[in-house]
Image: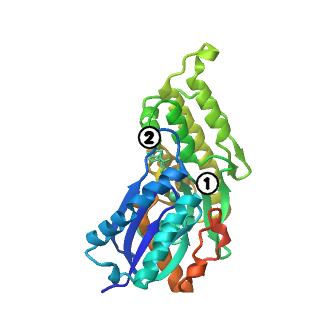
């Protein structure tokens, strides 16, 4: 039987278990996603849901893969970055299983995992990556032994910004797909703050301005939600595209990878595809099953790390909620 890794994702809304072999074949992937009834992600409530459900998710993943926990050779978990109380649940589950069943354990960085699953599933070698999700907005590429960050958000993450705006507009979570749909009904662009600072992005002014347009009675003008949704997307995605293109020109990479939950957006895909073509770079979107947070990407990155550097000791498995992806050297790529 092939060697198997059980990957545990637990950085934010999604508790996920993926079972993957050392060649990259995924046997099962089970997600349990916290959906807030109102407001944003309350870390305490997310933690409770993950704590209540983890064993069910582990068992479903094992059943679907038609194996028992004893068949697992390695346990990988998301160690950084993320919401502290939520990260802890994944780390606890990993440590408990590792010690109960005597399986080697390895912690991985969640952002690096988004890129590694993209390299695996899109069969590309050395991409410039745009990682856009509920909690992250990062343009990165492999340079000098690390995944260097060329651009990132200075405040809100793109997914969180769109979800917050959608919530203000009375739409329920997640707002991203609903805003995408509304935007298709308009091509009436309303000027909104476009903020790129060097290679970094800021979405908070854009968010506030779009929110004020919704309350536009104050200005005596009635704005249509379709027009605001369209303008919000055009502005935010234009900013992302500008920074991605600049990083592409600088790094001269020949592949571009779009990943994270917001990668599902067709308008964003078409913008990034366009600039990739302009620079003769191959464009790939991570298959949607693996684009959002998932345990398979954690498992795969755990395998890469384990093969290059070996296991972690239990006293090395504490969570690091703020650790950045450029903190790590990447031995499996050098
Ligand atoms: P993740 O954090 O990677 O699991 O992705 C979740 C985020 O992706 C949420 O903010 C969603 O609103 C966002 N998202 C999902 N589908 C779309 C879409 N079609 N357009 C924009 N955002 C989306
Ligand atoms: Mg993510």
- Measured along the vertical axis of the image, is residue 71 above or below residue 157? below
What residue appears at the point 59 percent right and 38 percent down from the top-left corner?
235
| Residue corresponding to mark 2 | 37
| Residue corresponding to mark 1 | 244
Q: Quadrant of the N terminus?
A: bottom left
What residue appears at the point 46 percent right and 33 percent down from the top-left corner?
183
Cα–Cα gap, marks 2 and 1: 34 Å
Query: Can see residue 255?
Result: no
x and y percentages locating residue 124 in the rendered image: 47, 69
* Number of marks present in the image shown: 2
Q: Nearer the viewer, residue 158 or 37?
A: 37
Residue 45 relative to residue 72: left or right:
right
Query: Can see residue 333?
Result: yes
x and y percentages locating residue 89 in the rendered image: 50, 64
**What residue occupies the far top of the structure in this picture?**
220
Q: Nearer the viewer, residue 183 or 160?
A: 160
């Amino acid at each position: 039987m092939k060697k198997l890794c059980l990957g545990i994702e637990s950085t934010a809304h999604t508790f996920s278990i993926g079972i993957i072999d050392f060649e990259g074949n995924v046997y099962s992937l089970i997600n349990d996603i916290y959906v807030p009834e109102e407001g944003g992600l309350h870390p305490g409530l997310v933690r409770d849901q993950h704590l209540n459900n983890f064993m069910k998710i582990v068992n479903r993943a094992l059943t679907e893969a038609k194996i028992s926990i004893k068949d697992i050779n390695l346990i990988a978990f998301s160690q950084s970055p993320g919401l502290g109380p939520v990260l802890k649940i994944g780390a606890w589950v990993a440590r408990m299983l590792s010690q109960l069943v005597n399986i080697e354990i390895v912690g991985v960085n969640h952002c690096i995992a988004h890129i590694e699953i993209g390299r695996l599933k899109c069969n590309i070698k050395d991409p410039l990556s745009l990682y856009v999700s509920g909690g992250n907005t990062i343009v990165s590429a492999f340079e000098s032994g690390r995944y260097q960050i060329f651009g990132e958000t200075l405040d809100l993450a793109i997914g969180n910004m769109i979800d917050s705006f959608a919530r203000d507009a009375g739409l329920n979570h997640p707002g991203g797909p609903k805003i995408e749909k509304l935007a298709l009904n308009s091509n009436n662009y309303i000027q909104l703050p476009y903020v790129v600072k060097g290679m970094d992005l800021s979405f908070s002014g854009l968010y506030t301005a779009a929110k004020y347009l919704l309350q536009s009675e104050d200005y005596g003008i009635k704005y249509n939600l379709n027009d605001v949704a369209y303008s919000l997307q055009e502005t935010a995605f234009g900013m992302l595209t500008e920074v991605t293109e600049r990083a592409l020109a600088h790094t001269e990479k020949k592949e571009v990878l779009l990943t994270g939950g917001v990668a599902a957006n067709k308008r964003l895909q078409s913008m990034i595809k366009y600039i990739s073509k302009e620079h003769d770079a191959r464009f790939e979107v991570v298959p949607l099953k693996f684009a959002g947070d998932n345990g398979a990407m954690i498992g795969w990155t755990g395998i890469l790390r384990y093969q290059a550097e070996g296991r972690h000791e239990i006293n090395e498995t504490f969570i690091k909620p703020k650790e950045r992806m450029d903190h790590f050297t990447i031995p499996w790529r050098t």
